[in-house]
Amino acid sequence: MNDAFDYARYDRIRPIRWTGDALELLDQRKLPFVVEYLTCATSDEVAAAIHALAVRGAPAIGISAAWGVVLAARVVEAADGAQAGIALEPALQRLNAARPTAVNLAWALARMRAALHGAGADWRAVLEREAQAIADEDLAANRHMGELGAALIASGSGVLTHCNTGSLATAGFGTALGVIRAGVAQGRIDRVFAGETRPWQQGARLTAWELQQDGIPATLIADSAASHLLKTGTVQWVVVGADRICANGDTANKIGTYQLAIAARHHGARFMVVAPSSTVDMATPDGDAIEIEERDPGELLGIGGVRTVAEGIAAWNPVFDVTPAELIDAIVTEKGVVERPTVAKMRAAFG
Ligand code: MRU
């Protein structure tokens, strides 16, 4: 597909720009009505942007953190990589603490640490090259996953996706949304549905807008309409991203993913998880061991800054859930497809 695929047509948005001096992040709190880049000149500004969801999506968080390390290096004096590693560790810890669930953050920071080992006086340039490599590899992985995932989808299919897994959440092209882009381009996907993704509305505010930018028609549904939609037989595949995939295939993703997997299985639709191998965490045995981020309950108490809930009401706001491996039909990474994941299949694919 790579030679023929018109990436310029189907993938126009870039959420992360490195200027050489600063990191520019397409501010996802303001989309879709304000398209504005936030400039981060320090690693702590990058950590704050990750925490505040100015940049979000597991791969985009990892890439941003890697550039955050490059920014932290600007204010460190060190003779070589070993010295720099010690001096930079507090900044890396602060970046790592910005969000807990997406493993790509810790993975990218571990790569930046590893790049420093053995680096000489040019350690700053080494870090910059590593951050660029992390971004470039993510884009290449997404394009390859697009091919692998689309090949699983029969012509004339309908798909339902959740949250935002597109260019906005990655270096470009997207994970689940990359599969959808490729599937639409190949004529396999006729119908795209996007769940609005309460409470932060990644589906309504980001996915719907991103698909519109690329000329892919999509239909928005309330999250609570998903089972009703699946019952109609209009959707053959639910296609989602991931924030952490465990050694047994259990997968953490945006809150609401688990109930989609249950509904898909009940109605005979298939369920696909698409993520780069940087999202696979073989050190975490299963979903029970994943820390699930809980955010401000205030996100549930109003819409667009307007309070909709009476004063004095309690709210619980976990922003991820875990889909058990037995509900997943395929995990697609750039390394290949794991169908019906088990511990043995995951170990064979990811070591
Ligand atoms: O809270 P968010 O918006 O960062 O959550 C994002 C998701 O859950 C995505 O589905 C996941 O990170 C994959 S993005 C390619």
Image (spheres, rainbow, N blue to C red):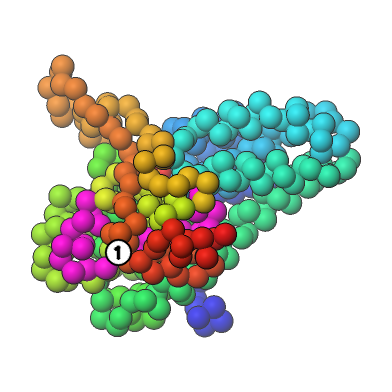
* Among the 4 quarters of the image, the one containing residue 153: bottom left
- Up the image or down, 205 lies above or below 70; here it is below
x and y percent of residue 154 in the render?
30, 81
- Up the image or down, 66 lies above or below 350; here it is above
Can residue 15 be found in the magenta stretch?
A: no
Stretch of the chain drawn in magenta: 259-281
- Up the image or down, 26 lies above or below 302; here it is below
Residue shown at the point (22%, 51%) measured from the top left: 259
Q: Is residue 187 left or right of residue 228?
A: right
Q: Amino acid at mark 1?
A: Phe
Residue shown at the point (58%, 65%) measured from the top left: 140
* Of 120 and 167, the residue lying toward us: 120
* Of 159 and 214, the residue lying toward us: 159
Residue that numbered label 1 is attached to: 271
Residue shown at the point (34%, 57%) measured from the top left: 325
Label 1's element? Answer: strand
x and y percent of residue 191 in the render?
24, 71
* Among the 4 quarters of the image, the one containing residue 152: bottom left
* Of 215 and 231, the residue lying toward us: 231
Q: Is residue 92 left or right of residue 314?
A: right
